[in-house]
Image: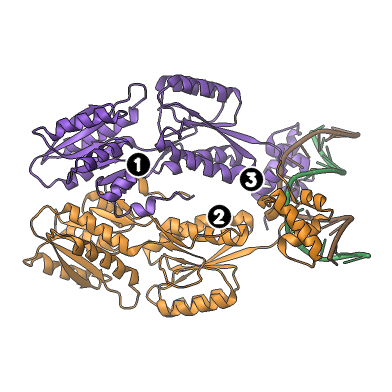
Chain colours: A purple, B orange, C brown, D green
DNA sequence: CTGAAAGCGCTTACAG
DNA sequence: CTGAAAGCGCTTACAG
């Protein structure tokens, strides 16, 4: 039989009120009775009934999340969906989620929103620390407030963050390179790394992906691949298309292109328009447009990182910490999924 | 403010007891008051508080699961782990899990165990219907008893099963063929399909995988691949090794081998022993041995189907149906994960 | 056919 | 420093 607060009260010859006091370190309890109760709790192996606890408790928890605005950034719709799904599930435990957005290309909006959130005194905070310097400020404030915080998508080292949920960016680039290499069947192949530039936004994990990609090829002994870099402002299709025109009319015709973020569909649209076939195109993330080009066979591989799951698990980490008071694993890398035309079907829908 | 049973009782000028009666269709309630209460419930948008419900309710639920013995079948340790993990989570809602095993190569053990389980009157039943005919009997009995049942791993069509969690076997074979084809860089390549024979056990989904594999190549126009079948009793390594000796000393030296189940590590051990390199080896499932050969580079690809998740979700489907009384999606195909040396790291540990 | 009351395992004032 | 009591939103006999 499951033992409860009542059982231990009886054993200790005290009231359940006293048991509760030692359980939660509230109110004064005589040292002797405290120890007595503690030993009985230990002996009987008491574990609290969370349902009853939640039902009886009036305390509410607020979790704040701050991410790039999903309305203007298709990728972030996915972590967003995961966060919302988790929020629904823990609502019954008196958890409320407040979600705010910042403009990915405007550091000030990030600063402003974090200020607002911190002054609202949440019980936990999830955010994407995409702006390095501002994020350090936020982190310092959180530490001072003893506010538990979770990093999502972007990782900053040496912090007291409760957890991190995201990708191992370098490894995903490394994997992309392996896939590219696998496709090579010519003597010499020109591979282009399309580097999306965005002067106003951070690109730290993009450069890690690129680094992983080049690392792979530098490790190959019988190297048939020649790597080229293509720095373009990918936010402007016109500029991108011009760059692509250049390389496709050059002497070093591309065998394959690697686009280190979710905007690979822009390159794909260029391929489609110009009827370019048999060029291996590898990119990131299951945006609707990317999925379509994958299904059409224009994109060969998409690397995906379960962004919904990252959102979902970020919320749950805080729930585990705040409510269950259980330990949380700090470093959580998502699986690096390889998505092709032949298995896309089973990755389309996010559930749980 | 969240509205409860009390609020609707007040509105309807009845006691909470009466509200409860109409909510659960128990006891007699005057038709007029019933309709009255119902309309108020509808109007106020009442949803029950599951925590309170669970706390107050004395009803226990028992879920029975029947799978091949994980002690003698490494693959089944994974669904088993998922089932147990889910069981822990729903324990707090008065759910108990009873798990039984049968011998994969002994149909009678399956029949015997199902009889035992059905006569124990569980509230829900999860099983792997690996023996087609006996399973049909079980299904009929479940239907008669109105016992909800969930298929795991193996799918039988046209049944009233609550749900199915498993793979799309043919598609996974199709994908494996695409990966094999990707690796081909020779004019003519001999590909061997290793068909694991097990006279006493069913191989239905294995043949689907093989079919998917051959289908892919039959669709290719510029076909450089020549397919061969290798029927071997894979349960006996000696026999397998002999067959491999034959093909490796033949005129049709293998470019690649496809093993349609988790015993691909046996073939890998042959490769290792005979120092066979540069032969593409593709198999299934993240058994420890397979993982090791993948990391050594002897196996190139493992196709994986999230078996832990299948177990986990099977239990949750029953929970959703029995406790939450929410609808359950019937056909649930797992993602078909492509695992390589470069991304294995992030698939090793099953969590949630 | 319907209501009043006890209880699930906790938390939270309140009284002493 | 400690106990008795009310209450969280339900379920479950019991009485009428």
**Image spot of residue A308 (x, y percent):** 44, 43
The residue labelled by disc 1 is A285
Rendered view: B112 above or below A33: below
* Residue nearest the observer in this picture, A216 or B290: A216
Q: Nearer the viewer, mark 3 or mark 2?
A: 3
The residue labelled by disc 3 is A92
**Image spot of residue A236 (x, y percent):** 30, 28
* Residue nearest the observer in this picture, D1 or B340: B340
Position of B112 with respect to A214 (left or right) is right
Check if mark 1's residue and mark 2's residue have beta carbons within 8 Å. Answer: no
- Quadrant for residue B54, please give it: bottom right
Check if mark 3's residue and mark 2's residue have beta carbons within 8 Å. Answer: no
The residue drawn where x is 26% and y is 61% is B264
The chain to which mark 2 is attached is: B
The residue labelled by disc 2 is B88
Rendered view: B349 above or below B198: above
Q: Secondary structure at mark 1?
A: loop
The chain to which mark 1 is attached is: A
Callout 1 environment at 10 Å: few (<14), some (14 to 19), or many (20+)?
many
Q: Nearer the viewer, mark 1 or mark 2?
A: 1
Q: Disc 3 to disc 2, how far (Cα)?
A: 19 Å
**Image spot of residue A126 (x, y percent):** 50, 32
């Amino acid at each position: 039989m499951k033992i409860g607060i009542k059982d231990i009260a009886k054993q200790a010859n005290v009231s359940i009120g006293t048991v509760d006091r030692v359980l939660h370190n509230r109110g004064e309890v005589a040292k002797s009775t405290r120890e007595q109760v503690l030993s009985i709790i230990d002996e009987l192996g008491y574990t609290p009934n969370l349902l009853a606890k939640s039902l009886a408790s009036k305390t509410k928890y607020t979790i704040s999340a701050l991410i790039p605005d999903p309305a203007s950034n298709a990728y972030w719709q996915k972590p967003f969906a995961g966060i919302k799904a988790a929020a629904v599930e823990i609502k019954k435990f008196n958890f409320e989620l407040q979600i705010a957005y910042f403009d990915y290309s405007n550091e000030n909006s990030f600063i402003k929103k974090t200020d607002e959130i911190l002054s609202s005194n949440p019980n936990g905070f999830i955010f994407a620390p995409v702006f390095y310097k501002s994020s350090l400020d936020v982190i310092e404030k959180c530490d001072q407030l003893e506010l538990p915080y979770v990093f999502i998508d972007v990782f900053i080292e040496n912090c007291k963050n409760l957890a991190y949920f995201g990708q191992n960016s370098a490894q995903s680039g490394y994997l992309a390179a392996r896939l590219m290499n696998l496709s090579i069947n010519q003597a010499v192949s020109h591979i282009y790394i399309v580097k999306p530039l965005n002067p106003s936004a951070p690109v730290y994990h993009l450069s890690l992906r690129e680094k992983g990609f080049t690392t792979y090829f530098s490790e190959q002994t019988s190297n048939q691949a020649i790597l080229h870099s293509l720095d373009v402002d990918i936010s402007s299709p016109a500029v991108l298309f011009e760059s692509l025109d250049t390389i496709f009319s050059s002497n070093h015709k591309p065998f394959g292109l690697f686009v280190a973020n979710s905007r690979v569909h822009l390159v794909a649209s260029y391929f489609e328009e110009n009827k370019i076939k048999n060029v291996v195109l590898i990119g990131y993330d299951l945006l609707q447009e990317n999925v379509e080009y994958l299904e059409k066979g224009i994109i060969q591989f998409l690397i995906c990182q379960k962004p919904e799951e990252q959102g979902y698990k970020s919320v749950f980490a805080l729930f585990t910490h705040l409510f269950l008071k259980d330990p949380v694993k700090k470093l959580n890398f998502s699986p690096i999924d390889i998505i092709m035309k032949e298995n896309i079907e089973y990755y389309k829908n996010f559930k749980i």
